[in-house]
Amino acid sequence: MGKRFDSGTRTGVRTGVVIVGAGPAGLVLGNLLLDRGIDCVILERRGREAVEGRARAGFLAAHSVRVLTRHGLADGLSARGHTHQTCLFRSEKGEFTLDYGELGRGEVHTVYPQQELVRDLLAEYLRRGGGIRFDTEAEEISEDGRVRTSDGTDVVGRYVAGCDGHRGVARATMTAHGTRTARWDHGVSWLAVLAEAPPSMEAVGYALHERGFAGHMARTATVTRYYLQCPRGTDSADWNEDRIWTELATRFRVDEFGQLKDGPVLEKAVVDLRSDVLDTPGTGRLWLAGDAAGLISPSAAKGANLAVLQAERLAQALTLALKRADESDLDRYAADCLPRVWRAHEFSHWMSGLLHGPSAEDTVDAHARYGRALQYARLDSLRTSRAHQDLFAENYTGI
């Protein structure tokens, strides 16, 4: 929980590691540090209800499940998660399904809504004696490990772990000190819809249509995530339930393949597909994990899995630094993580190219016709080539 201090002008807490952000990266890191006897405090700008209720990703890679299991953090997903190993593609060329669990390395996903994982991780973190301050925004991070907070107090750590996302103060601190960012805008936006509706198909569904991409991802037996490609700048308020279900039916070609199971829309928001990676995820006393270190587009469901990967690696490095005064693992943190981060980005970029073709109004343009033909050539290669299917499966489930 840390030790309180009074500097004369500001009061605060000293601890081993200040973790900024209570998402998957911060909570996995906090649990692993506590398990190694490292004192830490988490600062989270949102309230507990918001943290535990935020619906995000739901597909955990085999590597993430192994990490969580290894560190005693997988009881919930073992009891309530379910494995998944098929994806389906629909287009004007027809439909085909890949059993990716029988391809590549033979690995599968575990479907477990991120908000449930976060609740599990938070409960375990508190059970292990971890300190967390909700409704507390980190406003400034100093080179000496001092974090100024919105409530007027300081939290000082021997190290600071920035796990507060790509808009957080940790990333802003790194870039303000000259850390460069490699960035890509995919030029695509999705309307992300969470519906109280049973899954309409056993597989993850990818629909390619001249009106744009549509996606179907089961979350639970009664809740399904859908995506609809939409123009950049779209306001989600312009999409009522009738419009959403009509457009999903069109793009999934229900007249040909069967009706979708609809239901009330629980949430809807527009997501712009952008990706970036910091040249280095940390230096000195400040080290980053998760979206703070690099934002990846959701087209291949890699974000939460990269966060788990980085959190485990950073926990090892911080433990060595704090217990043995040995920063060699911190020095290797970037070299250990970045190759796997870039591999995930490469596959996510490829998936984006597969799923998003030229818009319908551009089909008379020569460049658009070329792009559309390439899109269907990629899809046909995936449908017919076992070598391509094995490579797809390895990257689809791998981190």
Image (cartoon, rainbow, N blue to C red):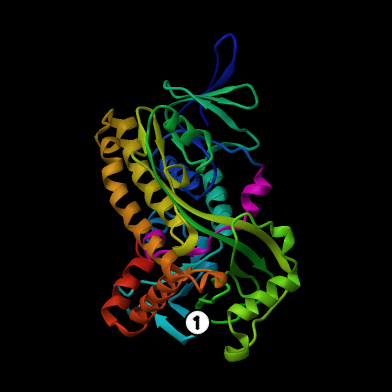
Name the quadrant containing residue 107: bottom left
Dot 1 lies on which element?
strand
Residue at the (58%, 67%) spot, across then down: 227
Name the quadrant containing residue 359: bottom right
Q: Is residue 260 above or below residue 272?
A: below
Residue 215 visible in the shown view = no
Span of residues in magenta:
47-64
Q: Is residue 277 above or below residue 187?
A: above
Residue at the (30%, 42%) spot, across then down: 334
Residue at the (51%, 73%) spot, across then down: 363
Residue 368 part of the magenta segment: no
Residue 226 visible in the shown view = yes
The number of numbered discs placed on residues in the rendered structure image is 1
Q: Is residue 261 left or right of residue 185?
A: right
Which residue occupies the foreground of this view, 334 or 70? 334
Residue 15 placement (x, y as % from top left):
47, 27
Residue 270 placement (x, y as % from top left):
62, 57
Q: Is residue 171 left or right of residue 309?
A: right
Q: Residue furthest bottom?
A: 256
Q: Is residue 395 above or below residue 336?
A: below
Q: Residue furthest top?
A: 8
Q: Is residue 59 left or right of residue 310?
A: right
Identify the residue under disc 1.
90
Label 1 amino acid?
Arg
Which residue occupies the foreground of this view, 65 or 374? 374
Which residue occupies the foreground of this view, 87 or 285? 87
Residue 184 placement (x, y as % from top left):
42, 51
- Crowding at label 1, few (<14), some or many (≥20) Cα neighbours within 10 Å? many
